[in-house]
Image (cartoon, grey):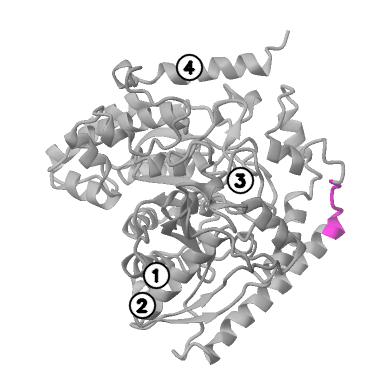
Amino acid sequence: MQESWQSIAARKQAERASKLPPEWLIPEALMPPAEEDFVQDFPYTSGFFTERELFITDSTASDVVAKISTGEWTALEVIRATCKRAAVAQQLINCVTEIFFEQAFARAAELDEYLKDKGKPVGPLHGLPISLKDQFNLEGVDSTIGYVAWVGRKPQEESTLVKLLRDAGAVLYVKTNVPTTLMTGETVNNLFGRTLNPRNRTLTTGGSSGGESALITFKGSFVGVGTDIGGSIRHPASYTGLFALRPSHGRVSYQQVTNTFLGQEAVKSSAGPLCRSPEDIRLFMTALAAQRPWEWDPQVIPLPWRTEEEILPKQLCFGFGMGDGYVTPSPPVRRAMEVTKEKLLAAGHNVIDFTPFETKEATEIIWKMWLADGAEEIRRDSGLTGEPLPVSVESNYGHSNSSIKPLSVFETWQNQQKRAILSQRFLERWQDTAKYTGTGRPIDGLITPCTPVPAIRHDTRPPWNYSVLSPLLDLTTGVFPVTKVDLQKDVIPTDWKPISDRDREMMEFYEKPQNHENALVGLALIGRRLEEEKVTAMLQVMRDVVKLDY
């Protein structure tokens, strides 16, 4: 008799819980009650951490590798402090899927011995703890991406990115939660449960890299690796106050990664970092590029990190996309946009209006690509144990959605041709901005919202998504934090009028700032394809000029 999906999930969760060291279990007297929504400050107010543990885990990745390389910190003490904070995060916000602390301790000890013997680090990431989205394959560790049926299915080969990170000196210690299928904006599945936002546990941290964003914002990780085919790096980062980069496909290896839509080549997912500073993005990207990953992964473009592309003009000009001409941002997101524009202008940069009207057409195109198989793959994999799909996944891909029909080959070709034409039109419009920027160049980047609203309540689905243009056209896109929801400032203006029926639906969904209390608000910085160096440098401008408005 086949084991029920409920039994498999219970067994897997018990296995995960058993890997938390007893000394890091939160005592009952310190455990926040379930109704306490804000737990972000627990490490500082509980007395559960030492001052040194807090100092280490509050640092940036760049600080960590610098201090380890000089011997000021050991890799072992850094990974122990990080694992402790990750263990606490898991107990409060359920963000981790796979735990391998003991292997991480052994790896860190080896690195400390190497540094002591050789007098130099093994690589640019020497001793740096890095967390991985559940998709990434490690020897002997499940990659389930939320499917109960995939428990016990060990990968035959490690992800190339895992090997590259390890060779650069990284210490891998956890994998993080994702939604079943990866294809929705909330991190929840039947196998590991729901990931919560530590600033408000009634809210999500986004998806599908929501386990990563939760762990990093709680400072149980310095850098985490996510993936993005429709917003899965950008939404979680914008919801949790992080910096992030969705590179163009081919800058970061995606080889031997467990995935949805295997063989779907029309729109490609991309792997990239979520972290706490632009410098940490650069550290991650340069460490990988230095290893010539194109010699290991044929889909990686043979393109070293180009330091000359990081040199920015003194005066930049940014396009400013307040929505997409179809749906307007909710009040807190609009305020983040206005704050950013005001501070950039005050710093001497130029800002011109550039509304990405193409988003509506891009949405129609990309959904046809995602559903080209008629949802056959997702329905097959979820049906292996009879487990139900999460609410938002079921509505998009499940059997209850009878409107889904597979595309013919000819229909698929026609849809891909529409993407090619849209890409050309968008580039022409971008280039044409040279007439208006005042710099003699086209806009250097485009600032837009990642989503119309901040972090959303559980089991809800916003009626619109701004983020499809970047993956469809493979545009390098960064994320930077700006502000947080303000209960007084972020009410809907009494004179607000919708510009479309979907715009009205979106604002009704937002309703009031109390639905997003304590949520952070980040924005997207879109560059052109393969502009990772320039976008990373411009993220430093955003950090230095815009700062945090809260």
Residue closer to the observer: 45 or 402:
45
Estimate the x, y position of residue 418 in percent, counting from the top left: 76, 68
Tags 1 and 2 touching, CB below 8 Å? yes
The amino acid type of the residue labelled 4 equals: Glu
Q: Which mark is residue 312?
A: 2
Q: Could you tell me how far apart the alpha carbons at marks 3 and 4 are, in whole angstroms?
A: 27 Å
| Image point (48%, 27%), residue name | 141
The reply to whether the magenta stretch includes residue 405 is yes
* Residue 464 shows up from this direction: no
Element under disc 3: loop
The amino acid type of the residue labelled 1 equals: Met
Quick one: label 2, few (<14), some, or many (20+) residues within 10 Å? Answer: few
Who comes first in sequence, dot 1 or dot 2? Answer: 2
> Magenta segment, which residues?
404-411
Q: Could you tell me how far apart the alpha carbons at marks 4 and 1 are, in whole angstroms?
A: 43 Å
Q: Which mark is residue 538?
A: 1
Quarter of the picture holding the N terminus: top right
Q: Could you tell me how far apart the alpha carbons at marks 1 and 2 are, in whole angstroms?
A: 8 Å
